[in-house]
Amino acid sequence: MLSRKAAILLLFGVLLVTMMSAGSGQPRRVPRRRRWQAATPAKVAEATEATDAQATDALATDAQATDTWATGAEATSGDVQPLTPALAVDAKARAAATAFRAAWRPPSYAAQDGPPLDPPRPTRPRAWAAMGNNERVVIDSLAAFHTLRAVGTDADCVLMLFGENTEQLHRQYAGAIQRLDVWVMHVEMPVGPGDVLEGKYRTVVQRANKGKPKWWDFVKLFPLAMEQYEKVIFMDGDLQFRKNCDELFDKPAGTHSDGPFSPFNSGLVVMSPGERALRGMLGLILEGAFTYRGFWNGTGTMGAEEFAPCEAKPKKDASGVRYKGKWGFVACETTQGLFQYYYTCRKGEAAPPTLTRHVYNYQAHESGRFYQKVKDDIKIMHFTGCKKRGDEKGRQLCPEAHSQLDAAAAAVAADIEGGAGADDALLRRQSLLFDMHRVWRIVDETHNLLLGKGGVGAP
C-alpha cells in the first residue's frame, strides 16, 4: 500500500501528464511583444490598424501630463508608409461645432468691432504668450510673467484666456494684469472633433489627457495668428525666469528646448506669426495625419533616434522613463509631436536649434551635485521635477525655487482685491483685440479643401 507522500506525488504526476496532453498541438504562448516582432509585415500592419483607434493610456510622469501607447510593436522607418487617411465627417460633432462658433462672442469690451482706444495702446514687436482657462493656471501664468518682468524683459506679455469663464477671470485678476503690463486675449479652442476628418485621430485626441479630451493643447497654435508681432514665444505657465531671455527672440522659428521625455518641449517655443504655418499645422490636425506607429505624416523616426517610437509604452527605471534604452516620447499626439514634425522633420526645411536644456528648461531637483554645478547658468526653471506650485513634496525637493514661486504668486494674489471692481474701460484697455472667427474661417477652408482633394498635409 502506497504511503501518503507517494500517493500525493503519483497524483501530481498524473495531473501534470494530463495537462501536457491537453496542451499538445497548441502553439506555445509567447509574450505579446515577442509575438508581434516575429509576425509578418502584413500582420503587424493589421494589428497596428486595429490598435491605433484605441484609447490612450496615460503614464503619470513628473515632466508631462500624458504618455500614450497603441500597439506595443517597435516601429522602424523602413516599414512606415505615407498616410492616406479615409476622410469622413462626424456630422453630429460638426453641427455642434458650427452652432457653437456661430454663437461665440468674446466679452463685449474685447469685441473686434468695439470702439477704438483713445489714445491707442501700442504693442511692442515681440511678445511672450501663455494660456489659461481656470484660476490656478491663470495665477501660475501671471506668476511667470511676474518673474519675466523682474528680469527686465523688453517684450509684451500676452495671456490667452479660453473656456467658459474668461470674463470672470479677467475681472478678477485685472489688478495683477495692470501692474504687470499684460495683454489679455480672449480665444477658444481652434479645432475640435467636428473638424478632424480621420476618425482614429479624433479618438486619440479625445482620450489623450489621461482618458479625457486634449483639444485645449491646440490653443498653443494661436501665437501663429498674432500677426501684430514679429516674434512670439509660447511659454507654459509653470516657468520661473531667473535671468533675462530676450535673446531667444533673435532665434529662428521653431527654436525650442527638449525635455527628458520629449525631443521637443512645446512649453517653450519661438514662433513667427504667419498664415502659412498656421494653415500648415491646422491641415495636419484636420487631416488626422498621425498614428502612433507612423508619427506625423508617416515620418516614423521623428528625426530623434534617441527617443523611442510614439507607440512604445516606456517603463520607468533608475534613469527615468525608458523603452529599450531610449527615452519615451511624451505627448507626441498633440503639439509636442506636431511641432517636432513641422519644424524639424519636413523635407527641405532646416531644423531650428535646440536650446541647452539645463539653461532654458531646467526640470530637475535642487539637490545633488548637478544642480550645484549648473545653478548659476539656469535661466528658466520648469516646475516638473520640482512639482507644481503648492506641492509639499516639491517644496522639499526645491525649497529655493518654490520660495521664489510662492512670492510671485502671493504678489499676484495681493492684486485680486484691486481688480474686483475693474470697469469695462480698464478691461478694454487690457484686451488685445483678436478675430477668433478668422481662425475658424481658416479651419473651415482647410476642412473643405481636404474633403475636395483627399488630404493636403503640410506645405
Image (cartoon, rainbow, N blue to C red):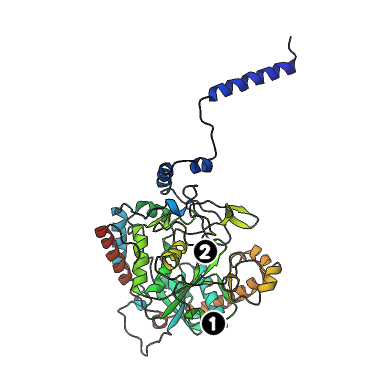
Instruction: Tell me which amino acid carries mark 1.
Output: Arg
Tell me which label, 1 or 2, sits earlier in the chain.
Answer: 1
User: What amino acid type is highlighted by mark number 2?
Assistant: Pro
How far across and down, in percent of the image, does residue 285 sit? 37, 61
* Quadrant of the frame with the C terminus: bottom left
Residue tagged 1: 149
Q: Nearer the viewer, residue 388 or 62?
A: 62
The location of residue 33, given as percent across then percent down, is 52, 43
Q: Among all residues in the image, which is located at the extreme bottom?
A: 119
The residue at the point 46 percent across, 65 percent down is: 340
Estimate how packed mark 1 is, as few (under 14), some (14 to 19) or many (20 or more) residues with alpha carbons within 10 Å: some
Q: Is residue 149 visible?
A: yes
Q: Residue at (43%, 46%) from the top-left corner?
A: 48
**How far apart in space, not on screen, are marks 1 and 2 (Cα)?**
29 Å
Measuring from the top left, give residue 315's x and y in whole percent: 58, 51
- On screen, 351 above or below 447? below
